Image: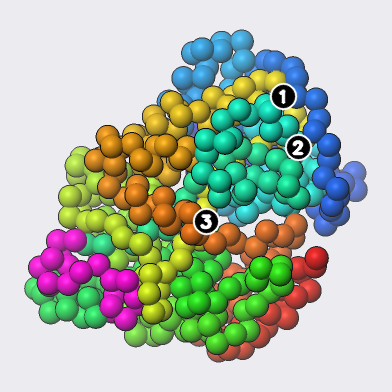
């Protein structure tokens, strides 16, 4: 799941969001700190007509095709795409500004799976009756769970995500090594590849380490891969542990040794993808969307046909992915909610999800697509990805998620950049999370 997703339309959306934010501030609007733990009741989902779909920047290039398919069949219920910035943090900020102003500028929201609790508790999105979405039972159960808050449905999962390890198969084959299952095996593979003429200057490993949502994901995967947890099953933070320290230390040591290139501290999904496609990395942790782009034969990728994917490695065995993906929700203040329901069902359908994976390689939520022989031939990562999503761990499901992820990012970034010793970073994070996460 990337944390991102013409220009005229985008500029208008930004301007509207900014104006609404100022209006909300001037009128003493809700600052988002108030939570309604009861969750709003399911509002009337009626009314048809034009709607707006607010989503992150579409780097896949296929969203227009998907929306056009709807518009061609529903000319009186046209969907207009409002593209928000590439950064997930900026997307969330603009959606919250829109909600705090009680604006109907956005109708359907493309929400990162970890935003469900925050948006539902603040009544920024509408509770959805499950009988309005008859295909829910055909989706991967773990993805449906991300769209619920206090056992009530607030969205429909349209794309899922699990982290994958992209690797240069050509170089591993030449060096005589297999895809790694542990961090030590990954380092050993890089050391062997370094002895090859074409491997002398190539970087070993990278992920997403800029201070944004992707760092929360990569930090969580490192902790989980070492046997730790960020938040336990009891809902309490648990990062001041030897396991969490081992996970963070793996990343810190990677930067210190050069195994992780210094430039990776600025990597989000797209810069990392471009580095891998330019042939500058042996291994890269990224999402499934990258597969189709890296395999293009139009000259944009130097590694087309030369790479493969594997599960993420861990400290002593295979690692654990963070569960990603996006859910489509309905703005509480929107008009034409009947059209919004129909549009969400359309986009979540097996037909549209199949069309999307064929064009973009993004992970679907429709379970049967993972077992489709034709799709598996084109996208050989589907079987391990299904297993990855099934065993993936969620980021903290908390109402104050924005504050929680900011605390995680600051602690992890401080350790990676050498400004805070890893153990101090984790003890400080434990104290901070304890004040933010309440039951």
Q: From where the camera sits, is residue 404 visible?
A: yes
Q: Which residue is mark 2?
A: 127
User: Quick one: SS at disc 2?
Assistant: loop
Q: Which residue is mark 3?
A: 323
Q: Residues within 10 Å of mark 3 (few under 14, many from 20)?
A: many
Residue at the image position 13 percent from the left and 65 percent from the top? 173
Q: Which stretch is magenta?
A: 169-187
Q: Which of the marked residues, 3 or 1, is nearer the chain's N terminus?
A: 3
Q: Which residue is mark 1?
A: 337
Q: Is residue 278 above or below residue 184?
A: above
Q: Residue furthest right?
A: 28
Point out residue 1 in the picture as x, y percentages from the top left corner: 48, 50
User: Quick one: SS at disc 1?
Assistant: helix
**CA separation in Å, label 3 and label 1:** 29 Å
**CA separation in Å, label 2 and label 1:** 12 Å
Residue at the image position 35 percent from the left and 47 percent from the top? 382
Residue at the image position 22 percent from the left and 56 percent from the top? 307
Q: Is residue 136 above or below residue 433?
A: above
Residue 398 lies in quadrant? bottom right
Q: Nearer the viewer, residue 18 or 29?
A: 29
Q: Which of the marked residues, 3 or 2, is nearer the chain's N terminus?
A: 2
**CA separation in Å, label 3 and label 2:** 22 Å
Q: Nearer the viewer, residue 206 or 375?
A: 375
Residue at the image position 68 percent from the left and 80 percent from the top? 430
Camera-side mark, 3 or 1: 3
Q: Is residue 155 left or right of residue 373?
A: right
Q: Is residue 174 above or below residue 88?
A: below
State the scheme by which the image is colored: rainbow
User: Quick one: SS at disc 3?
Assistant: loop
Q: Is residue 24 above or below residue 205?
A: above
């Amino acid at each position: 799941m990337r944390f991102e997703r013409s220009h005229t339309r985008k500029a208008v959306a930004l301007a509207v969001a900014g104006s609404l934010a100022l209006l909300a501030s001037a009128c003493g609007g809700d600052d988002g700190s108030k939570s309604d733990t009861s969750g709003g009741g399911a509002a009337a989902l009626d009314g048809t007509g034009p709607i707006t779909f607010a989503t992150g920047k579409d780097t896949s290039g296929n969203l227009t095709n998907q929306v056009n398919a709807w518009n061609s069949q529903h000319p009186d219920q046209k969907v207009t795409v409002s593209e928000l910035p590439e950064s997930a943090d900026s997307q969330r900020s603009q959606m919250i500004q829109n909600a705090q102003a009680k604006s109907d500028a956005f109708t359907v929201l493309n929400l990162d799976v970890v935003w469900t609790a925050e948006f539902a508790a603040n009544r920024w999105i509408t509770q959805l009756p499950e009988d309005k979405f008859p295909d829910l039972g055909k989706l991967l159960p773990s993805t449906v769970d991300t769209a619920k808050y206090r056992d009530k449905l607030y969205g429909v999962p349209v794309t899922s995500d699990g982290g994958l390890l992209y690797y240069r198969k050509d170089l591993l084959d030449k060096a005589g090594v297999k895809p790694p299952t542990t961090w030590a095996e990954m380092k050993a593979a890089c050391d062997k590849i370094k002895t090859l003429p074409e491997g002398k200057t190539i970087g070993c490993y990278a992920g997403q380490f800029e201070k944004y949502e992707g760092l929360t994901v990569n930090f969580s995967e490192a902790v989980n891969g070492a046997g730790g947890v960020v938040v336990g099953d009891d809902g309490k933070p648990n990062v001041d542990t030897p396991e969490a320290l081992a996970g963070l230390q793996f990343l810190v040591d990677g930067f210190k040794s050069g195994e992780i290139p210094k430039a990776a501290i600025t990597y989000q999904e797209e810069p990392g993808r471009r580095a891998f496609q330019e042939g500058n990395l042996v291994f890269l942790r990224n999402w499934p969307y990258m597969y189709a782009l890296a395999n293009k034969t139009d000259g944009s990728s130097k590694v087309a046909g030369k790479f493969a994917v594997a599960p993420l490695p861990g400290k002593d065995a295979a690692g654990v992915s963070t569960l990603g993906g996006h859910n489509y929700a309905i703005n509480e203040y929107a008009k034409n909610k009947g059209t919004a329901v129909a549009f969400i069902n359309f986009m979540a359908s097996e037909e549209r999800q199949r069309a999307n994976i064929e064009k973009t390689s993004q992970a679907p939520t429709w379970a049967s697509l993972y077992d489709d022989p034709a799709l598996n031939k084109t996208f050989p990562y589907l079987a391990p990805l299904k297993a990855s999503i099934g065993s993936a761990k969620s980021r903290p499901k908390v109402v104050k998620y924005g504050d929680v992820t900011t605390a995680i990012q600051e602690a992890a970034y401080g350790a990676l950049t050498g400004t805070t010793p890893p153990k101090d970073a984790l003890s400080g994070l434990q104290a901070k999370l304890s004040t933010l996460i309440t039951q």
